[in-house]
Image (cartoon, rainbow, N blue to C red):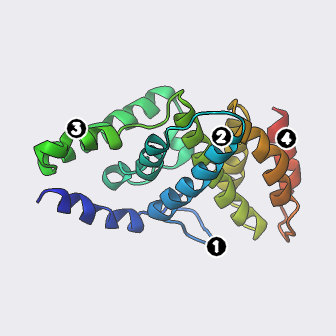
């Protein structure tokens, strides 16, 4: 089947819905999430470059565009479940990486195997590109949860998602994080909302932790 099998498999990311099992005003697929993460990341990287950082753009685009490819095999596991323990998170990652490895062994031509192993690897690490991916990934959680809360969705999971993503972002030491917290987040919180949930208070509490 070769690389055709990989290209066909990308359609499956359009059918995997994030945060399954909860009422949502707007559903988001894993494919849409990945596209948005790329958009966030390239702007975050531009901010870093303005502060003198050197960005490996090829690596950044590879890891951001492919960071959730493994969900083709395991689906979207809810964030609170995935991160309920380090052991569980590690086991899920091992299963995901193992299934990606098997897919590459079975379907990717030998001449491209090393490229695919490299491109579909876990991209979140301590490099600046890996940290930008982490921020961009959590930013999309912030935006998805905020949109639900803003519309009056009282599902507790979206409050937890919004708060935890903000806490994770603010603890990453990057200039783009400072910009997000100082310039972008206030614009978000200041948007008009009819929500019975006090988004401003949740935001302030998360940033104070």
Q: Quadrant of the C terminus?
A: top right
Gap between marks 3 and 2 measured at Cα: 30 Å
Position of residue 134 measured from the top left corner of the image (x, y, whole percent): 57, 40
- Residue 114: numbered disc: 3
Gap between marks 3 and 4 measured at Cα: 45 Å
Look at mark 2 in the image and give the residue it sits on: 49
Query: Crowding at label 3, few (<14), some or many (≥20) Cα neighbours within 10 Å?
Result: few
Determine whether, in the image, residue 12 is placed left or right of residue 105.
right
Which residue does the image show at 46% across and 60% down from the upper left? 30
Query: Helix, strand, or loop for circle 3?
Result: helix
Q: Nearer the viewer, mark 3 or mark 2?
A: 2
Gap between marks 2 and 1 measured at Cα: 37 Å
Looking at the image, do the residues carrying marks 4 and 2 touch, with CB atoms under 8 Å apart?
no
N-terminal-most mark, 3 or 4: 3
- Residue 121: numbered disc: none
Looking at the image, do the residues carrying marks 3 and 2 touch, with CB atoms under 8 Å apart?
no
Look at mark 1 in the image and give the residue it sits on: 25
Look at mark 4 in the image and give the residue it sits on: 205
N-terminal-most mark, 2 or 1: 1
Q: Nearer the viewer, mark 3 or mark 4?
A: 3
Query: Helix, strand, or loop for circle 2?
Result: helix
Which residue does the image show at 51% across and 49% down from the upper left? 78
Q: From the viewer's side, name the closer residue of 64 and 138.
A: 64
Looking at the image, do the residues carrying marks 3 and 1 touch, with CB atoms under 8 Å apart?
no
Query: Helix, strand, or loop for circle 4?
Result: helix
Q: From the viewer's side, name the closer residue of 146 and 187.
A: 187
Position of residue 107 measured from the top left corner of the image (x, y, whole percent): 14, 51
């Amino acid at each position: 089947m070769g690389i055709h099998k990989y290209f066909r498999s990308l359609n499956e990311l359009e059918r995997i819905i994030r945060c399954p099992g909860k009422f949502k005003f707007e559903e988001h697929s894993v494919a849409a999430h990945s596209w948005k993460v790329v958009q966030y990341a390239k702007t975050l990287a531009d901010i870093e470059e303005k502060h003198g950082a050197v960005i490996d753009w090829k690596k950044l685009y590879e890891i951001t565009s492919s960071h959730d490819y493994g969900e083709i095999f395991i689906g979207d596991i809810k964030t609170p479940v995935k991160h309920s323990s380090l052991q569980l998170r590690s086991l899920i990652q091992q299963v995901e990486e193992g299934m990606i490895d098997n897919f590459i062994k079975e379907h990717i031509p030998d001449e491209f195997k090393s490229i695919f192993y490299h491109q579909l690897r876990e991209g979140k690490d301590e490099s600046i590109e890996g940290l930008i991916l982490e921020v961009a990934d959590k930013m999309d959680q912030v935006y998805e949860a905020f949109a639900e809360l803003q519309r009056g969705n009282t599902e507790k999971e979206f409050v937890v998602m919004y708060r935890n993503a903000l806490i994770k972002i603010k603890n990453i030491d990057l200039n783009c994080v400072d910009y997000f917290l100082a310039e972008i987040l206030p614009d978000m919180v200041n948007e008009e909302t009819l929500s019975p949930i006090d988004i401003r208070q949740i935001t302030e509490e998360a940033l104070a932790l």
